[in-house]
Image (cartoon, rainbow, N blue to C red):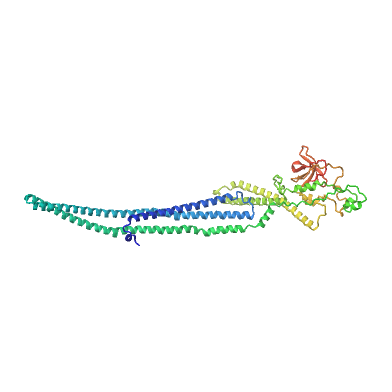
Amino acid sequence: MSWGTELWDQFDNLDKHTQWGIDFLERYAKFVKERLEIEQNYAKQLRNLVKKYWPKRSKEEEPRFTSCLSFYDILNELNDYAGQREVVAEEMGHKVYGTLIRYSQDLKTERKLHLQEGRKAQQYLDHCWKQMDNSKKKFERECKEAEKSQINFERLDNDINATKSEVEKAKAQYNLRTHTVDESKNEYAAQLQNFNAEQWKHFNNAIPHIFKNLQAMDERRTVKLGETYRTFAEAERRVIPIISKCLEGMVTAAKAVDERRDSGIVVESFKSGFEPPGDFPFEDYSQNLSRTGSEGAISSNTPKGERDGAPGPRPDPKHSISKAKNKLWLFGKKPKAPSVEDFSHLPPEQRRKRLQQKIDELNNKLQIEMDQRDALNKMKDVYEKTPPMGDPNSLQPKISETIFNMEKLRSEIHKHEAWLAEVEAKQASKDRRHSADNHHPTPQGRESPEGSYTEDAAQEQHTPHQRTGPVHPSGDPHEFDDEFDDDDPLPVIGHCKALYSFDGQNEGTLVMAEDEVLYIIEEDKGDGWTRARKQSGQEGYVPTTYVEITMEKNCKGAVTYI
């Protein structure tokens, strides 16, 4: 349907309608703007969220648990998802909002031109109508004046008292008015004909043409709205495949969580390499009691060595209790040990890992120095072949420095490899002994030599087996006679745990291994040394700062049960 033929008399309403159409388009543009601002804020908040929970530490310091790695993968996918929301906002901004704003300005300009053209045509038609109306009024006025002149002339012509001159004058006046009426009539007819022609042109040519342009403009506006609706949806639909991949990546990350692998990482990270504490020994306090007639019955439950009359070893019961007590730092705060170059302050397994990491770091540095040396040598060859490019002797100090660094790194690598080989050898030896113990169980009352860890493999091999309980009936009653002193030893006033190993090379000092439990028999008198006794009965001095001391309330040697 055409506006020109159907709405020829609705210029004002079409004016209002086209203005409403532009206002609606701008309202939709405002909606799109607020929508893309929501997307921008959403993407910004997502990126801030990812940044907030992204690990601040380096990759080497981050946990290697699958649950953590999966979470970081999810953060990556979420960051990509935020990027797609930004793409949506950008598409809406350029292809929808920007297009609507520009098109709105074009519509306003075009509508203004069409309405000005319509108003101009209407003004011209109004001008023609005004001229026609003025000629019509003039014709009407002249006719009335002519009628008056005619009445006056007929009155004087019939009046016998009127003079001839008066009659002639009235007649002349009447004829003049009649002539004026004819002229006014002709002018009115011409103006009427002209107005009718212009009015026909106005409503059959000018207005239909203007309304047709307004209709085309309004239809283009409607089409543009439909296109932007579709573009608005396409901006969202275009990123759906990528968003789906992001969500699939999150699902894949969730499936990658492996509880068994995480448990293995926990073991690998915190395994110390120490053996668990041994069983508590049986403390026989009846061995020094006098035997009566029922000795035969008692002797059946008494170790063979004691039945033979040889005094058995007299271990202090505090040893086993204190030893177990000091081993239970798993859920407490482990004492801090000083950081040393060979990592000897660490448990065996952790020490092996740290040494291996250090060797890998040194090898990487060595490779960098070797690459730099090769590059300098190539540059030197170029300078020798092309002297204008540079002096080859100027590179010699740098080459020498690089070679020196390489030798230094090689020395460090060799030193750490020796430490690593030592640790691995000890671990292998311990594994072999552990395997042998599984096939040949330790007799009751005998503590495994692995009960306390020592850094010296030779010491472990030559340290005699220690007993803290009664000897097995099949054992030799004199097996440990040399290890215990029956001469009134100093009473035990406490116990201590070795925080670090001590070689005890000086005379009067006592060798101890890290985590070994000793008995305190004499306190530090201010010289930095504490007198201690091993389970074997060996006594000596150890550095006070190397041990963690626990003094007993009853310090006269009486047994205190903890």
- Which quadrant does the N terminus fall into? bottom left
Residue at the outermost bottom position: 1
Answer above or below: position of 507 versus 196: above
| Residue 269 shows up from this direction | yes
User: Which residue is at 49% across, 57% downward?
Assistant: 236
User: Which residue is at 55% across, 53% downward?
Assistant: 79
Lateral position of residue 394 relative to residue 351, left or right: left
Q: Which of these two is toward me, 527 or 395?
A: 527
Residue 312 position in % (x across, y down): 87, 49
Q: Which of these two is toward me, 522 or 122?
A: 122
Q: Which of these two is toward me, 455 or 135?
A: 135
Residue 96 position in % (x across, y down): 44, 55
Lateral position of residue 509 relative to residue 142, left or right: right
Residue at the outermost right position: 293
Residue 341 position in % (x across, y down): 69, 46
Task: Please give the count of numbered marks on the rendered protein.
Answer: 0
Residue 27 position in % (x across, y down): 43, 53
Lateral position of residue 183 relative to residue 346, left or right: left
Q: Which of these two is toward me, 495 or 173?
A: 173
| Residue 514 shows up from this direction | no
Answer above or below: position of 246 versus 515: below
Lateral position of residue 145 relative to residue 265, left or right: left
